[in-house]
Amino acid sequence: MIATTALRAETRRATPPDLERLRADFPILRNVKVNGKPLVFLDNAASSQMAQPVLDRIIQYRTREHANIHRGVHYLSQTATQAYEGARRKVQRFLNAREEREIVFTSNVTDSINLVMYGYGRKFVGAGDEIILTHLEHHSNIVPWQLLCEEKGAKLRVVPINDAGELALDEYEKLFSPRTKLVATTHVSNALGTINPVKEMIATAHRHGVPVLIDGAQAAQHMPVDVQALDADFYAFTGHKIYGPTGIGVLYGKAKLLESMQPFRGGGDMILSVTFEKTTYNAIPHKFEAGTPPIAAAIGLGAALDYVSGIGFDRIAAHEHALLEYATELVGDIPDVRIFGTAREKAAVLSFYVGDVHPHDVGTILDQEGVAVRTGHHCAQPLMQRLGVPATARASFAFYNTFGEVDALAAAIRKVQQLFA
Ligand SMILES: Cc1ncc(COP(=O)(O)O)c(C=O)c1O
């Protein structure tokens, strides 16, 4: 064991100096000590940290630009409206959407999926119809569809996975029937890191005339997403996992589909005219943004997308991939540690089990060493059942993580083993 550790120390890769410098943009990473130890933050798939330029943009809005939007003729209202609508244009560019009005601000990806369920599903799905999901889904992309199925008498069909955590694509094709109304799939599995071949999946669905919703909660922060190249019908992501604030999410939808949908929530800003007899609705995307939206959070998200785009996904992906490879090797070499999720295409997520120790105990001991990982079922209980475990421990990496932090993770896992020996 000592020899292996020494060898690892020798072969430890150096974090690229430019990324090392970017780490300094994240105040929380230097401000927080856990038990007197430096924070090793490896829970980025749950929520990532905000860089100083994003925090600065929110403070600027809060201290110089805040008013309600779309309503006032006064200076501040117009300033806030421009900033909010500017953030929408940033999202449009980020996803390469054809039109600005195809970007709906929601409160998170869960909200985006529920919007599609209410707006599209309740209108177009009926008794006996079918919705295709995968075995990799987060509860956010299962439960809304179950609610719809209960209400309408529709059915879920589920794409199985192999032991590596990859979708069985031949089975996927077989699930289509004339009753299929929608495919809803995650782009990247939050629990295993599997990157699904969504472009091919969308092409297959379109051959059957079926629209596809992609849950991009774990993808948008790791890889470029081009909704036109994918030909995605709906694409959803969430601000707080892409170095932005909580309380803001995005739903991209093709204009034609969004126009065909019924509103999800009623209230101010989503109407053109209201009488007690009849209400007419605003144009998209405003039809889906009832009430005062999370203005500061949308502007913060815009700043986060600028920040990420400024680094570039080639650099982000190269470093995260190197971290994942190193972590897989280092943690995988520890006797009695099982790694879950060995897909060929994987994002920077490492799910593992240490001997027979319950993941919550693993997480607690890691925390004593300053290492933050997620433990539990990761809101993917059907996937845990398929893997035959109630939970896993999960380390998830961001571009600001270092090889030294992977060493800290491995050392903390060895400590768990010593304590439970
Ligand atoms: C794949 C996936 N989908 C959906 C969600 C839900 O995200 P939010 O809580 O921001 O709505 C998550 C969060 O972990 C996720 O990983």
Image (cartoon, rainbow, N blue to C red):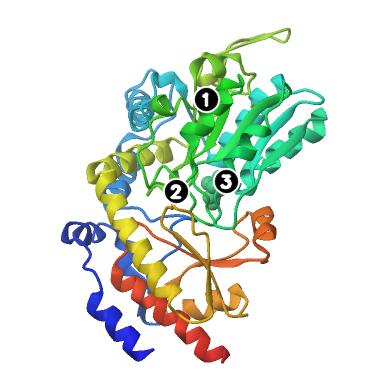
Q: Is mark 1 within 8 Å of ligand 1?
A: no
- Eyeballing the image, is 411 above or below 294? below
Identify which residue is drawn at 43% across, 77% down.
Answer: 333
Disc 2 residue type (three-letter): His
In front: label 3 or label 2: 3
Front one among 114 and 379 = 379
Which disc, if any, is residue 240?
2
Give the labeled residue for mark 1.
233
Res. 271 image quadrant? top right
Q: Are marks 3 and 2 in contact (CB under 8 Å)?
A: no
Disc 3 residue type (three-letter): Leu
Counting residues from the start of the chain, the first of labels 2 and 1 encountered is: 1
Which disc, if any, is residue 167?
3
Q: In the image, 325: left or right of 12?
A: right
Q: Is residue 73 in view?
A: yes
Q: Is mark 2 within 8 Å of ligand 1?
A: yes
Q: Position of residue 90 (x, y in %)?
A: 33, 31
Quarter of the image where the N terminus is located? bottom left
Which disc, if any, is residue 315?
none
Identify which residue is drawn at 55% across, 28% down.
Answer: 204
Q: Position of residue 324 (x, y in %)?
A: 38, 62
Going by the picture, which residue comes out furthest to the front? 170
Disc 2 from disc 1: Cα separation: 23 Å
